[in-house]
Image (cartoon, rainbow, N blue to C red):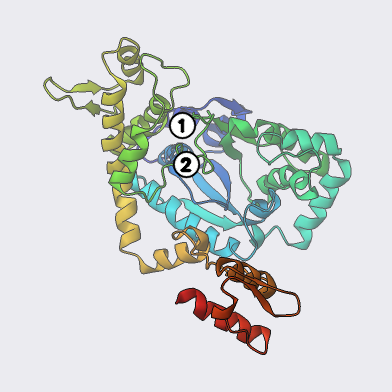
Amino acid sequence: MAANMSPEESIALIKANLAEVLNPEIIDDVILKEKRPLKVYWGTATTGRPHCGYFVPMMKIAELLAAGCTVKVLLADIHGYLDNMKAPLELVEYRAKYYERVIKSALKAVGVDIGRLEFVLGSSYQLSKEYTMDRFKLEGITRIAVAKKAGAEVVKQTDDPTLGGLIYPLMQALDEQYLDVDAQFGGVDQRKIFTFAMENLPTIGYKVRAHLMNTMVPGLGEAAKMSASDADSKIDLLDDPKAVEKKLKKAKCVPKEVEGNGVIAFVEHVIFRALALKSGGTPKLVVERREEEPLVYESISKLKEDYAADILTPQLLKNALTAHLNELLKPIRDEFDASPDWQAVQLQAYPAEEGPVKVKKVKKEVDPARKAAALAARQNVVAKPDGHIEGKDADKVTVGSSTEETLEKMKIAAES
């Protein structure tokens, strides 16, 4: 547990701001009876570039670190490939390096100590003989329908799924054992994978873990959650202040409507929690107003109350979020700008995203005979199959001894 926290305070922070906790007694036993730090893992498939939606799990990881936990971040390179081949094999190494850098930077931006943070590459142990045999054991007892159901909300689903997508949840369950943790952390969309692990790991001789689940935060656009595939919903962690402002201006934020409002949800689950971690206590969100005193919020409930009453308008809220988010992103951008190594890794990990690809126009091949006929027609002449020319201007065109010469002379005639 953290040196400045009692065991009870540590447990409270571990369980705070979550949608659900499965087997919470495991957490209590580790801290109260075994009197040691809780070991937690969070996995992320190294696919698209991490966006601001990643701040949601980052806030929980920051809280876990602040509560004295040891946190392992699984850079799931093989999972990324198995999920509909979202991460090409030739890029996964670089993407894993990019993820490690951006996650570390995001956590440092909220002022937490990352000394108990560890990064583990999935392929570093998932290709071992022992892991493979355990995977075979799980595959031997798992029905296809069960595997498909377990990954339904995480793995891309199709009518005819690949084996990779079906194996994905089995591997995620096994990772709990091979990472030697007490608990796994993820979103509520992973609940079926968590219950699969609880039901099936004991059948091959391994213990049940606790599971911590984040709520799913609505996207800033029309999407159900912030997603890399929705341009209006995605704010990159390296976006400059103007880009952040532009994207937030376009964010969906219905006046007086709190439920399903992605802007309010982001303020609640990211900004308020970041401010609390930075201050070590009560958050204070300041909303500037032009001709009036600023609005100051120390609780999300009061902010929601004012929004529903239209005291806090969408424009005021967006302006405040823009200011606070840019403040949060600044140290990440500064670290990236000061690191040639990180910049090189980005180019290697996401080569196709460094600006539009210029496609060279290929000149369409034209059949010479058709070209000659068309040109001849424009000259008031007709090219006959045997090569001779007829028509009003036939005397103005001299036909050469070959097709090439004929076309060249016609070109000259057309340009004169």
Label ID, residue 118: none
Q: Is residue 124 left or right of residue 73?
A: right
Report crowding for label 1: few under 14, some 14 to 19, many 20 or more residues within 10 A (C-alpha): many
* Residue that label 2 marks: 231
Q: Is residue 115 visible?
A: no
* Residue that label 1 marks: 221
Task: Tell me the amino acid under the disc marked 2.
Answer: Ala
- The image shows residue 373 at horizontal and vertical percentages of 65, 70
- The image shows residue 248 at horizontal and vertical percentages of 35, 35
- The image shows residue 209 at horizontal and vertical percentages of 66, 37
Mark 1 and 2 residues: CB-CB less than 8 Å, in contact?
A: yes
Which quadrant of the view contains residue 78? bottom right
Label 2 sits on a secondary structure element that is: loop
Q: Is residue 157 left or right of residue 339?
A: right
Label 1 sits on a secondary structure element that is: loop
- The image shows residue 240 at horizontal and vertical percentages of 31, 49
Indicate whether 382 appears above or below 193. below
Give the quarter of the figure containing the C terminus. bottom left
Q: Is residue 135 left or right of residue 321?
A: right
